[in-house]
Amino acid sequence: MGGREHVRVAVIGSGFGGLGAAVRLRREGITDFVVLERADSVGGTWRDNSYPGCACDVPSHLYSFSFAPNPDWPRTFSGQPAIRAYLEHVADTFGLRPHIRLDSEVRMMRWDAEELRWEIETSAGGLTADVVVSATGPLSDPKVPEVPGLAEFPGKVFHSARWDHDYDLRGKRVAMIGTGASAIQIVPAIAPEVERLTLFQRTPPWVMPRTDRAITDVERWLHRQLPFTRAARRGLLWGIRELQVSAFTKRPNQLGLIESLAKANMARSIKDPALRAKLTPSYRIGCKRILLSSEYYPALARPDVDLVASGLKEIRGSVLVAADGTETEVDAIIFGTGFHVTDMPIADRVVGAEGETLADAWKDGMQALRGATAAGFPNWMTIIGPNTGLGNSSMILMIESQLNYMADYLRQLGMLGGRVALGARPSAVNRWNRQVQARMERTVWNTGGCTSWYLDAQGRNTTVWPGTTGEFRRETRSVDLAEYEVLRVGERERVPAVAGAVSGAVSGAVSAAAGAKPGRSRGGSAGSGAAPLPGALPPDPRASNAGGAGFDPGGASRGGAGAGASSAGGAGVDSGGASRGGDGADAVEGVA
């Protein structure tokens, strides 16, 4: 291997997914890992998106790790600075800094079939790893449309996720391209300071009021002193959203009442019938992510804000020409046009067992077994993979479910022993994907009459999970070895279907030996030798699955570090989740 550094696990990215994976590895007793981050600080999309007004469209107490509850959220829907500070706090509290390699962009990952390990090239050098956990996220690489004349535009141009804070917008004529989750926050934030703001709208979004408010000192005190109040708040927020899922996935016609409320929200601020007609969507609410804002419509009613109900067609010098022929001269262009979601650039940098890139393997659509592993790419898994997105809840729940799967994946490798790898069987991947796509047919995302960034180039929804977060948590509770091929150096051992049952029995025995209830918990950090984490209690030997005490929608009592003690290890809804929204591909799950 040329004397390269070798690690057990390489995690790519340091947003919610990457930091969550790092914490879980520590809790599983694995300390031989690195977190590779291309930027100069942690935070992922909450580092990159720093535009004016940037905030989350998921309540703060649900948009946080169950194992790292924050009693001091400043607002019910907190802004980007608070969320980024939370992630920095997680990195410090759980002792992750020694594992994080900043300014280390992954340029290529190649699977070595002889040595059964990944060769990784980064901007800071090379290394090898037994397992790769890709947590780059779908909202990491901005998408800017190819507009004729853009290169010759004489003014300032930038994407909402790459905000130029050195450019002064005051007194400028500004064009905002797109009406997605980021745009509806940017428009009200900059409208009062620019000379004139023109919003180019290809498709109007459905917008509901955002009931944001400051969290009082009394509430914070209660959450600090009586952790069960924090857990109850989180549980209520989670439960309400779980109850909403069936309307999105099975009964879209039930969303008519929500449409009426959204129209009433618009009517309160938009008195001009012509403008109201332009802002009224023609598709079923929920087909695109429902956006939350109480300032968006009032901003559009301002006399110095114009709405062009058409997409941008071309640019002639400093004049922007819409598809309907409208011409607007501006000094600056801000693109709120989303991200590469169904064509993630990281896929071009992953080369699997057959010498094929992940992008080539996914050329007809992304698909991964339980949203985590892809056929032909052994010992590689992704966090927030295909069909793990949500349309109405917190992605942190989905992330934690995938961390459960990751943890059991590593346990299975440990139990198999020796130099070993697990490769997802194509039949298992295809079966899972068929089931997901069959469920998707009835959902509002497929039947609502819109074109959204949830759909890939073939029109398939490879982004959203067509069920509840509780369902996904149950589906990712453990690894079924029957869905994998066991690979060893110099041979391929095909595991019969019974192996999954045997593995489950072994796991159950391990759990029982650790004092857990058979059939309800799985071997976790108990007996793993994991060192106590800074700022947290050591893992409870009764806990079968470190990662957050609290409510598990799957019906099993799980427990995390300090399970049973709500002030440690994270009382809350340990249910599983991550975020989105936008027009075309805009959003940050909160970058609401």
Image (tube, rainbow, N blue to C red):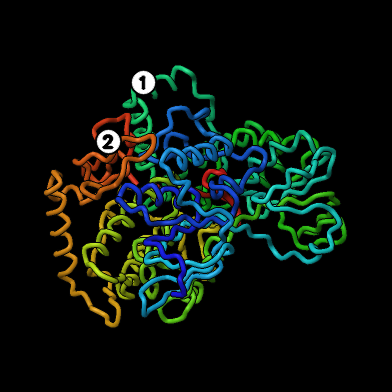
Q: Is residue 497 left or right of residue 8?
A: left
Q: What is the x, y in percent for residue 115?
A: 36, 76
The location of residue 8, given as percent across then percent down, is 37, 62
User: Crowding at label 2, few (<14), some or many (≥20) Cα neighbours within 10 Å?
Assistant: many
The residue located at (84%, 42%) in the rendering is 172
Residue 379 spot, x, y in % from top left: 36, 68
Residue 404 visible somewhere in the drawing: yes
Count neighbours of disc 1 (C-alpha within 10 A) and say few if under 14, some if 14 to 19, many if 20 or more: few
Nearest to the observer: residue 444 or residue 188 = 188
Mark 2 and mark 1 lie on one chain; the one further toward the N terminus is: 1
In the visual, does 236 lie left or right of 142?
left
Q: Which amino acid does label 2 sit on?
A: Gly
- Looking at the figure, which quarter contains the N terminus? bottom left
- Residue nearer the viewer, 336 or 37: 37
Q: Name the residue under label 2.
A: 562
Q: In which quarter of the image is the C terminus?
A: top right
Q: In this view, does 64 lie above or below 362?
A: above
Comparing marks 2 and 1, which lies closer to the viewer? 2
Residue 460: % across, % down: 47, 66
- Residue hosting label 1: 225
In this view, 568 is above or below 107: above
> What kind of element bears circle 2?
loop
Mark 1 element type: helix
For the point 36% across and 20% down, the residue is 225
Amino acid type, residue under disc 1 in the picture: Gln
